[in-house]
Image (cartoon, grey):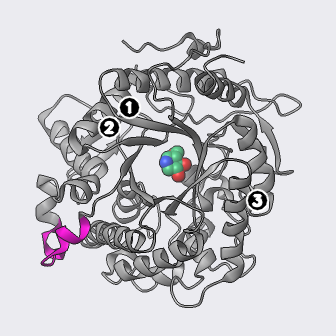
Amino acid sequence: MVSLPSGFDGRTVPSVPGRRLLRPDFIWGVSTSSYQIEGAAREDGRGPSVWDGFSHEPGRIANGDTGDDACDHYHRYGEDIALMRDLGVGAYRFSIAWPRVLPEGRGAVNEAGIAFYDRLVDGLLAAGIEPWVCLYHWDLPQALQDRGGWAHRDSVSWFADYTRLMASRLGDRVKRFATFNEPGVFTLFGYAFRWHPPAVDDPSQHHAAIHHVNLAHGAAIDVLRAYLPGASLGTICNMQPVRPVDPTDQDRAAAALLDEYWNRAFADPQVRGTYPQALAGRIAPFVQEGDMERIRRPIDWLGINHYSPIYARADATSRLGFAWSDAPAGVPRSPIGWQIDPEAFRDTLLDACDRYRLPIYVTENGAGAEETGDATGVVDDVERIAYLSCYIDALEEAVMLGADVRGYFVWSLLDNFEWGAGYANRFGLVRVDYPTQRRIPKASARWYRATIAAQVRGSVP
Ligand code: IFM
């Protein structure tokens, strides 16, 4: 039985148990993404992404924030690698900004952009940290959106060509590649809810985009296999139980639908070769002969991003037949209102192992907060520690019950640009003081370092 540690009421920092049930080669890491940390949005030939334009539109992002400067990781990556080395992580998952290496999305290569990722990869390897490259974390080149974006079937070959470029430039040193991060989020939020670019509510574009992203995944896996036969390849999906906000038949049906879009629209076709039932009919107009075989290419692992259960309610005005809902009153919540339910995490891992039969890496898990530091910027983030502690307990329990979980990456190394919430919402183990770009490790960074050391060396330092 997983229980909530007492840190949630701010009294006790959870201890650091040895994690003896985990594999000796269990990978402890941290994750970030390009648009959320890099900054340098107009430097060294980078082209615009859909997030540049969107974040500059009035009213889209809290406080009018943009990713123009973000954490200035483009210039401070050396300092950030040193922070990771200090944490003792074995791996760092980051994403490539497609428009930094191909400013128009295709065609002319921006060598300065490639050189940045060369420096980053070399620095990580020199620090003994394995680079895990994710090819797409939502920052589509604007030039490709202007041609129709993911709703256009040509997006499959655009992505395959971009993948070929990155495989040929980084594949001599990078051995882990993921194709997409959380396609369930950027398709639903971008093509139905209008919370992300391209900010349309258009079921036809939405369903086309789902299918083309799946095809692009399959095409990218083929490219990576051809170029890098020894590489370890995966896909990264958000997976969280979807619950009806009220126990009515209508809300249950809404939750079942959202579950298909959120949890299964990508992993099911990519790993099992079929779309889930309700979605299959909606996607059918876009499926051509041979597509399902093109999508279902063998992969080596499944990345799962998980934070909390999510909720749906019926909505007759919604073109998809459901609406997003906040968690009901009374459930335990993180400081930003996300439900805390480590048993749901354990069960998600067990279900995913059972359904997809692949080794699993938890590629994102973490807690957001609108926190301020003390006068020196130090953050005693006991609630984040409590969250991480009980979620890692739940992971360990899933392993005990048979789940093949091989790694865990905290979201995130740094506070960063949290999409629509801008910079107000902080997820980092390390605080970023944005006006000065000073990095200040939080209490959770020290706790995570001790957690890793306890497992890696078998003792608490
Ligand atoms: O910041 C995001 C990340 O980009 C994708 N997964 C969820 C994180 C927290 O909201």
In the picture shown, does residue 300 fall above or below 105? above
Marks 3/1: CA–CA distance: 34 Å
Quarter of the image containing the C terminus? top right
Task: Judge left or right: residue 190 versus residue 388.
Answer: left
Q: CA distance from mark 2 to mark 1?
A: 6 Å
Q: Residues within 10 Å of mark 2 (few under 14, many from 20)?
A: many
Q: Are marks 3 and 2 in contact (CB under 8 Å)?
A: no
Give the amino acid at mark 1: Ala
Q: Is residue 215 visible?
A: yes
Q: Would residue 435 appear left or right of 410 to someone viewing this image?
A: right
Identity, as a three-letter code, of the amino acid under mark 2? Tyr
Q: CA distance from mark 3 to mark 2?
A: 35 Å
Instruction: Look at mark 2 in the image and give the residue it sits on.
Output: 311
Residue 48 shows in the view: no
Left or right, residue 142 beside residue 123: left
Q: Amino acid at mark 3?
A: Asp
In the image, residue 177 above or below residue 253: below
- Contact, CB < 8 Å: mark 2 with mark 1? yes
Q: Is mark 1 within 8 Å of ligand 1?
A: no
Mark 1 lies on residue: 327
Q: State the image quarter where residue 203 is shown.
A: bottom left
Query: What secondary structure is marked by label 3?
Result: loop
Position of 425 relative to 349 (above/below): below
Magenta segment's dominant SS is helix
Residue at image mark 3 = 72
Q: Which span is picked out in magenta?
A: 283-295
Labels 3, 1: front one? 3
Q: Measuring 31% from the left and 68% from the top, which residue is drawn there?
A: 218
Residue lying at 61% horizontally and 62% vertically, measured from the top left: 35
Q: Earlier in the sequence, mark 2 or mark 1?
A: 2
Q: Outermost residue, bottom direction? A: 107
